[in-house]
Amino acid sequence: MTGIVLFKTALTVYLVCAVVYAASLWVRRVLTARVATWLMLVALVIHTFSFASRWYTNGVSPAVGLHDALSFFAWVMAAAYLALQLKTKTRILGAFVSPVICLMMVVASVELGGAVGAPAALQGSLVMFHVIFSVTGEALFALASCAGLMYLIQDGLIKRKKEGGLIRLLPSLRDLDRINNICLSWGFTLLTFGILAGSGWARIVWGSHWQWDPKQVWTLLAWGLYALLLHQRLVVGWQGRKAALWSLIVLVFLIALLIFRKLFFQTIHSFV
Amino acid sequence: MRLFLIGMSHKTAPIEMRERLQLFCSEGNQPLTELMRLDGIQEALYLATCNRVEIIARAEDDGQAVDVLKSFIFRRGNLSIAEMEKCLYIHRDLEAVRHLFRVTSSLDSMVMGEPQILGQMKEAYRMAIENHATGVFLNRLSHHAFQAAKRVRTETGIAGNAVSVSYAAVELAKKIFGDLKGKTILLIGAGEMSELAARHLLRQGVGKILIANRTYARAETMAAEFQGAPVAFDRFGEVLPEVDIVITSTGAPGYILTAEMVTAVLRRRRNRLLFLIDIAVPRDIEPAAGEIDNVYLYNIDHLQGVVDANKEGRRTEAMKAEAIIAEEVEAFEQWFNALEVVPTIVALREKVEGIVKGELEKSASWLGKLDEEQRNRVEILTTSIMNKILHEPMTGLKEESREKDALPIVAVVRRLFKL
């Protein structure tokens, strides 16, 4: 019960935080963004407690099941964003990150209080690693795309010589590019571990590493696209606008594909 | 007030003169001891930045002070008097106070609202204290100036505005590169504007400056000044892959940096961001270069646009700042008047008269028993005692103010008698 109350509190604070961030874009003051950042930190702490309490009362590892996975996704985004905030001066990026977090939390709250015990197929530490790594990886990709979107906006403003407060308010191109880079590299590494753990578990449960399940194909495709993106970044020397643009295109493409898959395909990789 | 301010700044002195000025202020020797030895100078402040040299002094009398200070500047400036006379401005009393407050608040700066001047002023004041060159008056004046500057900075948006072209360039560079530490700039053409921009970038901690100029000797002297490195003009293309910001200001009739060159350079620098600032008229960089990904090209009109975008806001802020200065000048004047000798004497007299009158009234009951003549005698007696007591302090104050600065003693008298 406490877990649910904490979750709902966290959701509310995230929502307020998103509103304050939006307001900071509107009034073009960094001070409001600073308030929003603190709100996000508060929300994150409450959110963390909600996980802890859920883990403690149910004995279930977090991030298994749709509710927890989405909630965990939001948690990772918030935590990663706040951590990056320490390194760079990118306060306003929160205005792009916080709505995504809210969305995840809202969707997660639909499943709130549902299926506490995981199905038999999902019990084991390998599953926990699989889910945590994959969800964290994907959350970081989402963060990379937020930074990418903001990069494109700032790039456009500077290129087209749009004077005024907005250029000053948005973070510098280099900081956004760095966030994009960091999130991509870490997201990719974690997703790789997640896939490996998952395929190891699949071998135990389903008898082979690979089942040509739509969800598996989708994940592998995502992995491949991000591998390509990272390759372009590191080897070909993609930087700045191109990297930002493509990280956004890849994410949109993957989300579209995900919706398409949900609508037209059945998957054995579903436990909700 | 017998306050004099004499100096020259970027507003009054031409470029050549400013170059001399820069030499003059980079020598770093403190002229305060020499100043204090001058005839009739009681207190002095000496402010030298690369855009201005000012002497603020309190003198014994109005007669010769200006001439004494002028000849001091001519001697130090090592320039002909005719040349210098044109560039000097002289302010007295309240005008001097106002000028000093405006300077300290950065309203008179080349880049209005720049924060360095306050620090430089504080340093000048510190030096004056160390050399025992300030007294009651200049101490109070300096603190007032700092207070005015602080008010202008916190109560108006002057400090936050991108007020000049070069400042705008720096702001943009920050929005591209985050902070500018460790970045490399290439100046192509060593004109005054590019020098100014370079100076601003250097203040932001830019790592290295490369200078390419058609006359190599000029590149060398400027490189020495900025601790940068000269580059042969026809070979600037070779250093392009390693620079982050390029500022061009040559007098070339055509483009010296084409879009094609930039594309090639970008490949060699693995698409690292490149900020091109073209302040030459006619332009030095082909406009198409700005279309290339990760290349940001601003020319003088664009930068002017950035500056103009907040011109209106700046004007209202400047008006607010001037109003603050006016208030502070008035406050200082009030303090000063309160310290002047004559008002002090008047106040002292009024106070003692008040006491005598009060005491007489208190004793009205038994004084009433006396007859008319006796009462007059008592009054005459008290008045003459009062006059005798006041005589020495009053003449003393007057003499003091005639001979030298009476402020310290006036301050003491006011404190002792709670005036």
Image: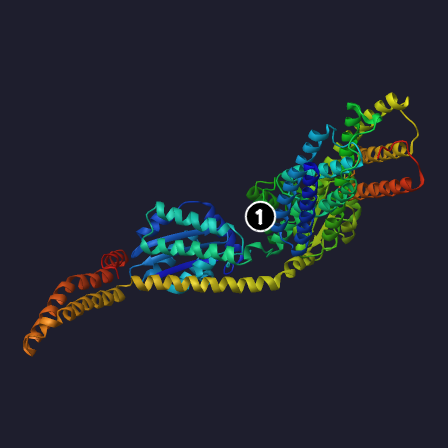
Nearest to the observer: residue A73 or residue B338: A73
The chain carrying label 1 is B
User: Within 10 angstroms of label 1, few (less than 14), some, or many (20 or more) residues?
Assistant: some
x, y percent for residue B233: 68, 44
Nearest to the observer: residue A118 or residue A164: A118
Q: Is residue B347 left or right of residue B47?
A: left
Q: Where B62 falls versus B233 (above or below)?
A: below
The quadrant of the image that shows the C terminus of chain A is: top right
Query: Considering the numbered disc 1 on the image, is that residue within a helix, a strand or a loop?
Result: helix
Three-letter amino acid code at the position of disc 1: Arg
Nearest to the observer: residue B413 or residue B200: B413
**Image quadrant where residue B328 sits:** bottom left
Q: Is residue B300 left or right of residue B418?
A: right
x, y percent for residue A200: 84, 22
The quadrant of the image that shows the N terminus of chain A is: top right
Where does label 1 land, which residue? Answer: B199
Residue B279 visible in image: no
Residue B337 visible in image: yes
x, y percent for residue A205: 87, 23
x, y percent for residue B186: 66, 44
Number of numbered discs overlaid on the protein picture: 1
Q: Is residue B76 left or right of residue B413?
A: right
Q: Residue at (32%, 64%) from the top-left corner?
A: B337
